[in-house]
């Protein structure tokens, strides 16, 4: 049987992510479910980054994590954006979207209500919340 995975390369990449993201784990073999919330989020994100996808769809990347882990995740996402990756983030936290996104699309029941680009006057929390509440 062929061994298609380069285990040394995977282990090296995993160590790099553990160090870069400061994932607290007793070993690389530790199951993600036994890590803390922030470390779980960072480990799952690292697994997808290892796949080197051109597009990342990230749903609530900082849900349930502490402030330090949030900032680390924000920086990781911004780094991927700088590398030219397309990143789609969903989050109920408007300030989080404003911090990370170049544009925000407001959707209600699957329909696009509005799209606001970073350089637009309405790219602020007050305006975006008004748009959301007006559509309900």
Image (tube, grey):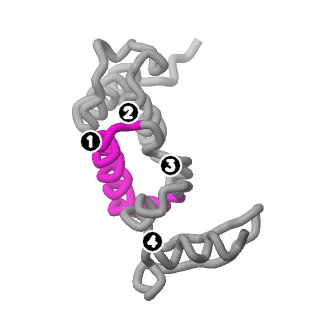
Q: Nearer the viewer, mark 4 or mark 2?
A: 4
Tell me the crowding category of disc 4: few under 14, some 14 to 19, or many 20 or more residues within 10 angstroms, Cα based.
Answer: some
Mark 4 or mark 2: whose residue is earlier in sequence: 2
Res 55 visible: no
Query: Which element is circle 3 on?
Result: loop
- Residue on which the image places disc 3: 53
- Residue on which the image places disc 2: 38
Instruction: Calculate the distance from the C-alpha at mark 1 to the C-alpha at mark 2.
Output: 9 Å
Instruction: Calculate the distance from the C-alpha at mark 4 to the C-alpha at mark 2.
Output: 25 Å
Query: Which element is circle 4 on?
Result: helix
Query: At 63% across and 78% down in the image, what residue appears?
Result: 114
- Which quadrant of the figure contains the N terminus? top right
Q: Nearer the viewer, mark 3 or mark 4?
A: 4
Mark 1 or mark 2: whose residue is earlier in sequence: 2
Residue 125: give its label.
4
Query: At 41% across and 67% down in the image, what residue appears?
Result: 98
The residues colored magenta run 65-88
Mark 3 or mark 1: whose residue is earlier in sequence: 3
Instruction: Calculate the distance from the C-alpha at mark 3 to the C-alpha at mark 4.
Output: 30 Å
Residue 119 higher or lower than 67, as above or below:
below
Tell me the crowding category of disc 2: few under 14, some 14 to 19, or many 20 or more residues within 10 angstroms, Cα based.
Answer: many
Query: At 30% across and 52% down in the image, what residue appears?
Result: 75
| Magenta run includes residue 6 | no
Identify which residue, 36 or 27, lies in the foreground.
Answer: 36
């Amino acid at each position: 049987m062929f061994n298609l995975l380069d285990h040394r390369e995977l282990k090296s990449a995993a160590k790099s992510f553990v160090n870069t993201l400061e994932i607290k784990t007793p070993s690389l073999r530790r199951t993600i479910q036994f890590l803390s919330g922030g470390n779980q989020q960072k480990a799952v994100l690292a697994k997808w980054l290892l796949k080197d996808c051109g597009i990342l769809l990230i749903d609530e990347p900082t849900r349930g994590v502490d402030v330090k882990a949030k900032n680390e995740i924000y920086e990781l996402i911004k780094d991927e954006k700088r590398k030219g990756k397309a990143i789609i983030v969903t989050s109920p936290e408007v300030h989080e979207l404003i911090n990370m996104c170049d544009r925000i699309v407001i959707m209600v029941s699957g329909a696009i209500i509005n799209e606001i680009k970073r350089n637009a006057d309405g790219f602020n929390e007050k305006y975006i919340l008004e748009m959301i509440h007006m559509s309900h």
